[in-house]
Amino acid sequence: MTGVVVPFPVPAPRPTPVPQEVAAPTAPAFTHRDGLRYGALAAPLAFAALPLYVNLPAHHAREFGLPLAALGALLLAVRAADALVDPWLGRWADRWLSHSRTRSLQAATAGALTLAGGFVALFLPPWREGAALWAWTAASLALTCFGYSLLGVLHQAWGTRLGGDAGQRARVAGWREGLALAGVLAASVLVSAAGPGLAAAVLAIALVLALALLARAPLPAARPLASSLPWQAPWRDAAFRGLLGVYLVNGLASAVPATLVLFFIRDRLQAPALEPLFLGLYFAAAALAVPLWLRAVARWGLVRSWALGMALSVTAFAWAAALGAGDTVGFALVCAASGLALGADLTVPAALLTGVVQRAGHAGTGDGSYSGWWTLATKLNLALAAGLALPALQALGYRPGANDPTALQALTLAYCAGPCVLKLAAGALLWRWARHHGERNP
């Protein structure tokens, strides 16, 4: 993937002035070559994440007959447990990054081996039914998630440590997330068209190439830590708590449709053959939108750009609620619009997080601790989406392959209405955070 998040702004006193960013004046320029070397690892991470979070529920329900409620409970339990490891991994990432580049790369290699091995075991189980299948699925999912977490937290902390002003921070995030979208695009085609076996081979090759590029990526000079930043230190910062609240609510709004999209395409639209096209269009639009959002940041600032992305997402999913069987052109437009909005979600939040770390005085020493909690929030969103949406759909009478109008209406409401409500709540939280903790010229 927490505290209680109030979804609507409440009156509060005017904020006290915040200090200027610490690392921005001295951060070295971040070139296109730097962006490729640093961001490359995001591609195989995203390549693994798509089948892990999007294809897995539908794949195991269809291929092995696992019931949605039980599968959702398993995904919630494993992902929630995995998320709790992230703050601990964040502290270790600070140590690795502060020790040496070699130590950081050794940790990344260990994570890559764990991720690749777990991925193969998860999608190619030796058993196809019974308790053995459940045990194998739980163990291999835990292994895959741990490898993904180790790599993801370290990579996020590495990028946060690069620092810079708002524009440079957005470029760092843009390169990482833009290359992540390239990985997602590849996965959306290969996993659906060629199956998990070929996908596992491509993942292994991509991890090797990405680690070779990361070895030459920029990294500020190591600064040995007198002591690790306490795991709870980020929570003492009101700006971090507020931003994480926005990120949680907004992330859940994105995770719910990601969990349900294949069911919506197959049963509501009756267009299973177009799954690769829809997913590819969605992620291609997001990738093409990243440079546009970087320009938006330069013109309107980070906060206003993110709010615009939220508004576009609400518009897209409200439109999707009116679609039915055969409305493939309409859904293609929804995919393009929501993909465009996704570009803001991928580019802006991480840049705002780096600014919070800088103003807290923890740049270069506590980046991993902040990144660990940030990654935990991402995991919790995905876990809650699976653990709540799937059982709720089953309770409302929906089953994969259903054509009952009541069941399909329940699927539509879960896929469209829920995300709209959550996005509006996230926008309200963002407005409140910007008033009290936002950067100058946010």
Image (cartoon, rainbow, N blue to C red):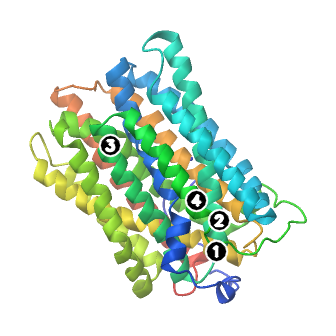
Question: Residue 158 bears which disc, if any?
Answer: 2
Q: Which residue is mark 1?
A: 162
10 Å neighbourhood of mark 4: few (<14), some, or many (≥20)?
Answer: some
Q: Nearer the viewer, mark 1 or mark 3?
A: 3
Picture quadrant of residue 342: bottom left
Could you say which disc has been placed on residue 212 in the image?
A: 4
Disc 3 residue type?
A: Leu
Q: CB under 8 Å between callouts 2 and 1?
A: yes
Please state the horizontal and vertical placement of residue 40, each as a whole percent of the image. Answer: 50, 62
Element marked by disc 4: helix
Question: Tag 2: residue type?
Answer: Trp
Query: Which residue ends up furthest to the top in the rendered image?
Result: 130
Say the numbered circle drawn on residue 190: 3
Is 246 placed left or right of 147 in the picture? left
Q: Residue at x 23, y 49 (%)?
A: 278
Q: Is residue 125 left or right of residue 329?
A: right
Q: Which mark's residue is nearer the viewer, 4 or 3?
A: 4
